[in-house]
Image (cartoon, rainbow, N blue to C red):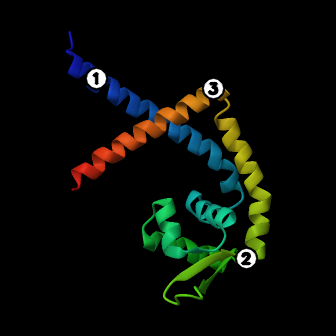
Amino acid sequence: MLDSASLLTLKSMHLHSVLSKAFKSISEHSVAGIKAAGFNPTAFAVMEVLYHRGPQPIQQIGAKLLLQSGNVTYVIDKLESKGYLFRHPCPQDRRIIHAELTTEGRKIMDTIYPAFTQQIERAYSGISDEEMDQLIKLLKKLGRSAESLSSSTHK
């Protein structure tokens, strides 16, 4: 018979596995459409930030997406070469470079973003509205708890 600490460890490991597998399944389902449109998930995420938030400093795009600056630069280079975005210096501080969608980039997002949101909606259709609210609340609680443990470890 297992003691309560061992049961908690097993339950935590099981939850981690279930959460990871669910995230993988949902992610694979949701990116199918953007891959068909010729985007990888990172490039689409950069485009999505610019689509919703307008011009952004390149450094902030990486921070919002939890990406290394080298990865962001590479993705932005590719998107710029395809004519989906352009860079320009910040008028107040020329050391800061902004990325902004081109008209073509905005047209692409106007076309593929609605289908992406439908894919996300379908991916979550296995749970009710109430269950979704509960899950959001629980995952936020879990995330905040893990973040506080992580930040207290690094002090």
Residue 20 in view (yes/no): no
Q: Is 57 drawn above or below residue 130 in the view shown? A: below
Give coordinates of residue 60: x percent, y percent.
50, 70
Task: Kindly identify the amino acid type of the residue bearing the numbered disc 1.
Answer: Leu
Kind of residue at badge 3: Glu
Q: Position of residue 122 (x, y in %)?
A: 70, 36
View extreme (front): residue: 92
Which residue has dot 1 on it?
A: 8
- The residue labelled by disc 2 is 102
Q: Amino acid at mark 2?
A: Thr
Q: Earlier in the sequence, mark 3 or mark 1?
A: 1
User: Is 150 on the left-hand or right-hand side of 32?
Assistant: left
Q: Is residue 93 above or below residue 77?
A: below
Name the residue located 27 percent from the left edge and 19 percent from the top edge.
7
Q: Is residue 23 left or right of residue 87?
A: left
Q: Position of residue 61 (x, y in %)?
A: 53, 68
Q: Earlier in the sequence, mark 3 or mark 2?
A: 2
Give the CA distance from mark 1 to mark 2. 52 Å
* Real-space CA distance between mark 3 and mark 2, rounded to the nearest whole angstrom: 39 Å
Quadrant where the C terminus lies? bottom left
Label ID, residue 130 = 3
- Crowding at label 2, few (<14), some or many (≥20) Cα neighbours within 10 Å? some
